[in-house]
Image (cartoon, rainbow, N blue to C red):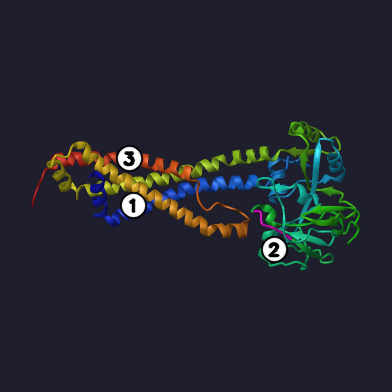
Amino acid sequence: MLFNLSIASLFSRKPMVFLTCFSIAISMLVLASVAHIETQVRQNFERSVSGVDLIVGSRTSQLNLLLFSIFRLGNPSNNMAWQSFAELASNKQVSWAVPIVLGDSHQGYAVVGTTLDYFEHVKFAQQDKLSLQEGKLFMHNEQLVLGATVARDLGYQLQDEIVLSHGAGKVSFSQHKNHPFTIVGILNATGTPMDRAIYMPIEAVDSLHGSGSSKQDSHAHGHEYDGVQEHHNHAEHPQAISAALVGVNSKIALLSLQRIVSQNKTEPLTAILPNVALHELWQMMSVVELSLKVIAVLVLFASLIGMTTMLLASMRERQRELSVLRALGARPWVLIWLVEVEALLITLLGCILGYVFLSLGLTCLQPVLLHHYAFNIARFPEPLTFLGFTGLALGLAGMLALIPALLSYKKSLSGGLRFP
């Protein structure tokens, strides 16, 4: 009976109840979206460095080395000598080492000079390997491979020729027009910054900048990748690289190898653990995350206060209704629970609408974020997290609804039955 009375009472005030539900839905959307985006950003960052045990570069901060080597954000403060990389790769504790050279771009997309080992050892997500959507990996100095986002955004196809630019900006006044490259492969989408990069042979870096031999086609030894026999190029290696991605034979030796690299006497180097650097990044962002959560909770609290105000405003209209219930023998707790149930129903409906709004918004935004920013976001918020927010909203609603509930009981006693 109590539930039926609450439903009938809410239907008698449909416009006001709908606006209140909508207000709570928007506040729940804000609160849940902040938590969902925070979780998805963490997961996207973590899935971008899978399989890499150590990142080595010239002396710089952990975050700078991580951001420019993995996420293509920022620039290296200095280069790392090839001799240092060769010594690192020959260390018995190192399983594999992949050099990368940055500094060039094409229409705003970073160009990564590397070896075929990059596609073999550098992984993403849950140790997933890079794979080709079409074509093959580069075999010669004038060939390159595109990330999925680059190919899609710029409309490039296999065998198209492109010209690279010096520098990382979208607009460059220094283009390498005398050294065009041919697209020979396009990678499958990964939902990571790998999709927004262009990969070329590391041997072509010096020839691209006029300090080495050009377009050498030496095919000495093969490399198997996805069933296709590829060939390494024996052109001269660059004098310096931007960073090196390293895998170790044993996780136990990881810290000792990091110490050895940091104490290198040839040149000052920095060796970082990607997970530790990411943890430092999250610590720096924790203040921003906390601020956003506090703002979202305050928005929810403001919406619930609006609901309480609506219930208080309706008490004058419902004074006779409550007095009739008292005259029919309704106990005090019945009147209190009548208002409480109404408040909880309004809040619950608002939470459900907030989840629906958020899911619809994420469904619409997912392809846009993946296309323009290579940011893969789940379409549906984590149910357990949203249930926690719903419990918080219902708890606050129950406490705030005590004000109009107790007031309704007092009015029903003092007002009595009055007829015009």
**Does residue 189 show up magenta in the picture?**
yes
Drawn side of residue 153 relative to residue 30, left or right = right
Which residue is located at x 38 percent, y 46 percent?
A: 302
Residue hosting label 2:
151
Q: Which mark is residue 398?
A: 3
From which residue to which does the magenta span run?
186-190
Can you name the residue that lies furthest to the left here? 420
Q: Position of residue 300 (x, y in %)?
A: 40, 46
Crowdedness of circle 2 by 10 Å Cα count: few (<14), some, many (20+)?
many
Identify which amino acid the numbered label 1 is placed on: Thr
Identify which amino acid the numbered label 2 is placed on: Ala
Q: Is residue 111 above or below residue 309?
A: below
Give the camera-side residue of 147 and 4.
4
Quadrant position of residue 208 = bottom right
Q: CA distance from mark 2 to mark 1?
A: 47 Å
Residue hosting label 1:
20
Drawn side of residue 162 relative to residue 195, left or right = right
Q: Position of residue 309 (x, y in %)?
A: 29, 47
Drawn side of residue 122 relative to residue 285, left or right = right
Crowdedness of circle 1 by 10 Å Cα count: few (<14), some, many (20+)?
many
Quadrant position of residue 109 = bottom right
Can residue 308 be seen here? The reply is: no
Main secondary structure found in the magenta portion: loop
Which residue is located at x 44 percent, y 55 percent?
A: 357
